[in-house]
Amino acid sequence: MSLNIDQLKKKIIYRSNYRGTKEMDKLLGAFTKKYIESLSLKDLKHLEELLDIDDTNLYNFYNGLDCDIKIKDNYIYTLFKDFKFNAD
């Protein structure tokens, strides 16, 4: 059974807001909320892959620190890396 784009968006929104650490919940939740409606299906798949990365490596990637894994180079990863989180 394949997911339609709306189901995929709902899945991504849920996963981005319930990571396990409050910091990553807020960061990824804000990132997803800002961009999800403007992403293509390909970009949504890449965002889903980004969400598969554990919190420690994703946090390190976002903050320019060393990661234990190889981070892909695509539009979503660049968009996430350049995202300016506002904690207001």
Image (cartoon, grey):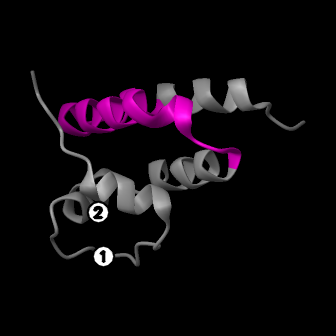
Q: Are marks 2 and 1 in contact (CB under 8 Å)?
A: yes
Closer to the camera in the image, 19 or 87: 87
Q: Is residue 23 magenta?
A: yes
The answer to whether 49 appears left or right of 5 in the picture is left
Say if 4 sits above or below 69 in the image. Answer: above
The residue identified by callout 2 is 57
Write the start and end of the magenta stretch as one range. 15-41
Question: Dot 2, how many residues are within 10 Å of its Cα: few (below 14), some (14-19), or many (20+)?
Answer: some
- Coordinates of residue 22 in the picture (x, y in percent): 21, 31
Tag shown at residue 35: none
Q: Is residue 11 magenta?
A: no
**Which amino acid type is marked by label 1?**
Asp
Picture quarter containing residue 78? bottom left
Tag shown at residue 68: 1
**Which amino acid type is marked by label 2?**
Asn
The answer to whether 64 appears left or right of 34 in the picture is left
Name which of mark 2 and mark 1 comes first in the sequence.
2
